[in-house]
Image (cartoon, helix red, strand yellow):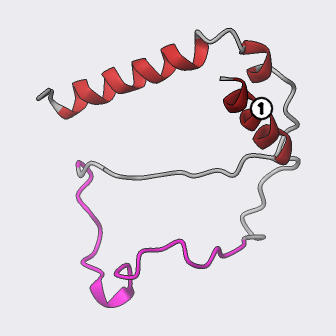
Amino acid sequence: MNLPKSRLWRTSLSFVFVLAFSSGRAPAQTTNIPARITREVDENNLVVLHGNVHPLARAEFDQGAAPLGLPMERMWLVLKRSAKQEEVLKKLLDDQ
């Protein structure tokens, strides 16, 4: 199949939604999840996460500001599931 990237992305995303919401296991997805952000964000109280920056992202390679129209591709935001969410997911996968 030789689809354009945007169409392939939409098709893949649609497939994932169909699988996620048609399995009849919606109650596991609608359980009350406690808020992880429990107070207002304080910009003066930050934590550096080591090992999360590409090794070539160093000052010596800085070429200045990027053009405003430059698309940001291949960006990932990875969040860790809570222990309860992990347990529910494992049970869902075992049931399937």
| Residue 68 image offset from top left, x and y in percent | 27, 52
Q: Toward the viewer: 60 or 13?
A: 13
Q: Residue at x 40, y 82 (%)?
A: 55
Is 60 magenta? The answer is yes
Q: Toward the viewer: 24 or 39?
A: 24
| Residue 79 image offset from top left, x and y in percent | 64, 50
Marker count (numbered):
1
| Residue 35 image offset from top left, x and y in percent | 85, 39
- Number of other residues with Cα within 10 Å of mark 1, as a class: few under 14, some 14 to 19, many 20 or more: few
Horizontal side of 14 relative to 51 (left or right) equals: left
Q: Residue at x 74, y 22 (%)?
A: 29
Q: Quadrant of residue 26?
A: top right
Viewport quadrant of the C terminus: top right
Mark 1 lies on residue: 91
Would you place residue 66 above or below residue 77 in this image? below
- Which residues lie in the magenta part? 47-69
Q: Is residue 37 visible?
A: no
